[in-house]
Amino acid sequence: MAESARFDKEMYLDILQNDLPMKRYVSRGDTPDGVDIRGPHEEADSAIARAIRFTRSDGTPRLQPVLGSAGMGKTHLFWVLREREEEPKFGPYTTIYVPSPPSPVRVPLHFHACIVDEAGDDLFSNAAKMLVSRFGNVSDGGGQDIETIMDHALEEYPGISSDAVKVLLQYQLDPKRKVVARRWLLGDALSQEELDSLDVHTVLEDDDVTLATIKVLSEGAREPLALFIDEMEGPYNTHGEHGERQFLEIMKRLYNESKNIVIVASCLTEIWPRVYDLADAPMKSRMEEPVELRHFTKNDVAGFVVRSMNRYWEEKNVDAPPNPLFPLTEEDIDTAFTKSKGVPREAIRHVINRLDGILLGREQTAVEEQDDYVVKLTPNVVIGAIVKAILIAGIKMDVEVRLRTASGGEKSQSSATVVLERDGTEHRVSIDVPNVKDWNRSGGVAAYYSAKRLQSALDEDEAEIAVIAIPEESHGAKFESISASLGRRLFKLRLNETTAKQLVEMTNRAKLSEARKAVFLDLIGSVFGPSEQT
């Protein structure tokens, strides 16, 4: 009673009104979640821990599907795995967030970018040490000729793996070339002179080269790599069965050709049966039994509020109120649980709405919609955004747009090819994006290779028009030469970090700015030509 009497309600309300608690109800792969309620994901925890434990034991990859409807906490599970990396039951392992690939093109590069962004230097160093240990007879390679070690290593890693091995050994053993070797391993844009200095002939563009690089890196990993794929149904949602089949084919290759990898694939419960049916028998045989996230109970909702408010008061450096739910009540918790039907995201949204009503003096407040996706400017993501932009513009011009194929076949996806159809007339457009880490710098030789792939697609009649997205600063004699030779058949979209992200964000909302819409309307108009305009 004495403690309650000392409780200054007005002071606490003033604190709350000046800085509202619980502002976020959507989990994102780039923003840690502050509070976790373990009950809804306990079954998933156990299944993933088991897969990681077995992979740590034998190095064999595992694929663990995790199912849940929208708002059930699939993305939140990534942060759970990240927090538990060092727990005895789970760890050690490294968690890597892989945003849903919006298109089935250049998927290995999408995986590679996520892997090296999270654990690049450790993986580079460990893979190089593994090679030196195996082929140099001395763990650190001290005093040994790098060429001798390289010759021995290339006997076991010939062909498409050879460049990755060469670069890894130079990264570890040649201080003068370490910086440029690191840039190659990161997938950065290099000049021809830099490639020559490394004595390599490829860049991380081709699917086979990229998968071979991931293979060597994973072999050298000292602990399992847990790849958390957020919404593996992304290609299905955007491009249907064909898109998902191509994505599953890449996942199968990643499984077959790598070691020490656990793929945690989250998927909407409603879509999973269709995705599973698209997988071939070998792929199905590699999947662990799916586990499903469960709904919040009423106690889970209350527990989330109590933990969130305790964290809030700690940050404000004041004692928590006697009522841990304050300023909410048991009735508010019951209402949030009932209205949300136990869906975690909806329960939290209702709690935030009620808090705003109490603290802002309004009983009905509109909680702003929050994005749940992470923009990562891999070629896969940018190509996906361009395809969506063409689709959005196509609707205005009564043009149907669909992904036809990825050039090079299902196992070597380089450029996307889309079909534009109107009034029974079809035209094909090939789309390519160079693999660059920084869109504020030149695309280097990667831009040239990208243009060269498009030139091949046009020369081989795979497409009639080509679209290339390149950094604004991209130049280079070779690129400009191809660009000039293709003339109006090559549609150039120059972007920087800001405009590239804006394009991805807009198309994820199925929108385009007026300026961008005009660009893609012009593209479609040039594809059909004046005689075909309506």
Image: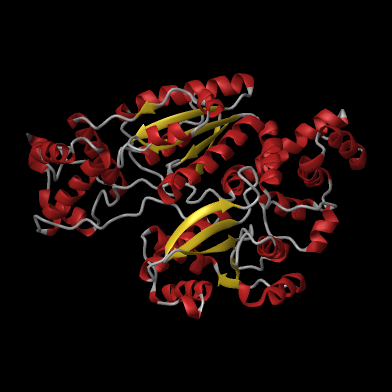
Q: Give the quadrant of residue 131.
A: top right
Q: Is residue 200 above or below residue 478?
A: above
Q: Position of residue 11 (x, y in %)?
A: 15, 53
**Residue shown at 82%/32% (left/top)?**
156
Q: Is the N terminus in the top left, top right, bottom left or bottom right quadrant?
A: top left
Q: Is the C terminus in the top left, top right, bottom left or bottom right quadrant?
A: bottom left
**Residue shown at 47%/72% (left/top)?**
520
Q: Position of residue 448 (x, y in %)?
A: 71, 65
Q: Position of residue 424 (x, y in %)?
A: 44, 63
Q: Is residue 24 visible?
A: yes
Q: Is residue 75 above or below residue 362?
A: above
Q: Is residue 217 above or below residue 11?
A: above
Left or right side of 321 for 30: right
In this view of the protein, which residue sits in the foreground, 109 or 49? 109
Left or right side of 123 for 176: right
Q: How is the image coloured?
A: secondary structure
Left or right side of 372 for 421: right
Number of numbered discs visible in the structure rendering: 0
Q: Is residue 83 visible?
A: no
Q: Position of residue 122 (x, y in %)?
A: 66, 40
Q: Give the quadrant of residue 297.
A: top left
